[in-house]
Image: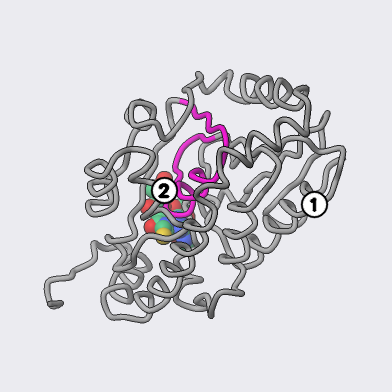
Amino acid sequence: MENRSGQVTTKKDQGILHIGIQRPDKKNALTLAMYDALTTALNLAEDDNQIRVVLLHGTESCFTSGNDLHDFAKNPPQGENSPVFRFLRAISQARKPLIAMVSGAAVGIGTTMLLHCDLVYADETARFQLPFVNLGLCPEAASSYLLPKLVGFLHASEILLLGETIAADKALELGLINSIFPSTDLSQQVRNKALQLAAQPPASVRLTKSLLREQQAQQISEVMSKEGKLFLQQLAKPEAQEAIKAFSEKRKADFSQFS
Ligand code: COA
């Protein structure tokens, strides 16, 4: 079964729901409609007994460049019920296992969504970046809580404060991803992992996922909500306005006038 609705595709294949982010001309930047489609696809997986594993992927040379920055200017999220926050709640509360397959850039929410996945595989072209500070914003998706737990406090500080790009081998060393496969083989290798997981006893898989995650579920929800409010406040401030304008004008942002 294959379903192409705009720039998010879904395909059911032997117990796996493949969810594709496909807007290659804009590096798979996520619009409001795409967040809604991703949430719908995740909910579909939760409700469909035939689906045992969800596999999230982008296109061959890009996972996603994160939130559409023009949308940030034109259609900023309005509150907790905005498409981006609904998507984050859906991915953070998913009961079925989520696998992510990353090629090329995974920026902003492209990286923070991986913190809610159970297995993350990448090829050697994968590059991760959390440029929230570079954009005058702040962490989202509970990344200010999850990232230090995953990579340690100092690495998390560096990743979030400097917002530099992290190459695949560094991401592996930090524990952001499970493995790197050659790009020519990535799809097959990840499909094999997904099939392997789909063949495991499903109730036991769900129980194990829940045990791994439940101790931090409350904290994740609270941090995500707090970050979300602060993120929206930041988005309206001059630092973020300058960063987003600079992106549109294809120039480096200048924060020298801010105190
Ligand atoms: N929002 C909106 N448009 C985006 C975008 C985004 N997040 N990321 C890329 N695009 C657009 C570019 O504006 C460009 O559009 P154009 O062809 O109309 O000029 C097109 O996608 C290609 O992007 P480009 O920057 O030329 O590709 P690249 O391979 O040189 O770099 C990235 C890829 C992802 C590293 C770079 O595009 C980037 O840093 N994007 C912004 C990421 C970001 O800050 N996301 C928000 C995080 S909160």
Q: Secondary structure at mark 1?
A: helix
Which quadrant of the picture is home to ligand 1? bottom left
Give the residue number, with chain letter if any, for mark 2: 146
Snapshot quadrant of residue 194: top right
* Identity of the residue drawn at 38% across and 79% down: 233
For badge 1, the amino acid type reads Leu
Where residue 80 sits, quadrant-wise, is: bottom right
Residue 155 drawn above or below residue 174 = below
Q: Residue at x 37, y 81 (%)?
A: 236
Label 2: how many Cα within 10 Å (few below 14, some 14–19, many 20+) = some
Q: Which amino acid type is marked by label 2?
A: Leu
Q: Disc 2 versus disc 1: distance between alpha carbons?
A: 26 Å
- Residue sitting at x 35%, y 70%: 244
Residue 201 place in picture, x, y as percent: 78, 26
Quadrant containing the N terminus is top right
| Left or right: where 192 falls relative to 117 | right
Task: Residue 216: give x, y in percent of width and height.
Answer: 50, 50
Q: Circle 1 sits on which residue? A: 44
Color style of the picture? one colour
Q: In the image, what residue occupies the spot 27% across and 63% down? A: 251
